[in-house]
Amino acid sequence: MYEDPRTPQEWEDVALERRSDAVELRRTERHVACLYYLGFTAECFAKALCVARGRTVPRGRDGHDVLAILEHAGFSSQVLPQEVRTFLADRDVGLRYQPALPEDVKIEDEIKAANRFVNWCTTQLRRQPRALGPRTRRRIAP
């Protein structure tokens, strides 16, 4: 059986791996899949913040709601720019059933918001005291 990551670094490692997947999906112009994987990236970073702050990772419905995970970790979504909050609010598992992005969704804007969130999370994680092994190298953004 698969196990969830246990440490902030393990969650961050998974997040960076999903981000690398998103880069490849973007390269091949698979925009829905790219956006879906950017949602995974955001979720894993939010879960890393939970663990870094000594909180349990939410399960069930809230376990995939990035804004709810952030709140559980002790962060107000109001600290994030509006486009990042919108990006996070729009990421849900229903995206996996979409054959194409809606016309009003621009992949470049979504990638920009995702990258802003990743940068914010990375800053927050570096502020958290943790005695973990060496950090993973940052992967290239989509």
Image (spheres, helix red, strand yellow):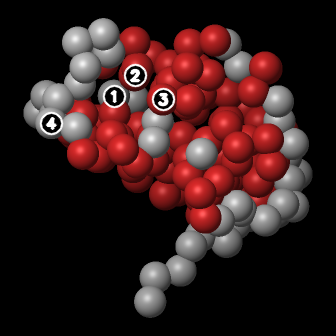
Dot 1 amino acid type: Pro
Query: For residue 90, which numbered disc appears in the image?
Result: 3
Dot 3 amino acid type: Asp
Mark pair 3, 2: CA separation? 13 Å
Residue at horizontal 67%, vertical 27%? 120
Nearest to the eye among marks 4 and 1: give it. 4
Mark pair 3, 4: CA separation? 16 Å
Q: In x, y percent, where is residue 36?
A: 35, 41
Q: Is residue 12 visible?
A: no
Mark pair 3, 1: CA separation? 19 Å
Residue bearing the label numbered 2: 111
Dot 2 amino acid type: Ile
Mark 4 or 1, nearer chain start: 4
Dot 4 amino acid type: Pro
Residue at horizontal 23%, vertical 25%? 101
Residue bearing the label numbered 1: 142
Nearest to the eye among marks 3 and 2: give it. 3
Nearest to the eye among marks 3 and 1: give it. 3
| Disc 3 residue crowd, few under 14, some 14–19, many 20+, Cα 10 Å | some
Residue bearing the label numbered 4: 99
Mark pair 4, 2: CA separation? 19 Å
Mark 2 or 1, nearer chain start: 2
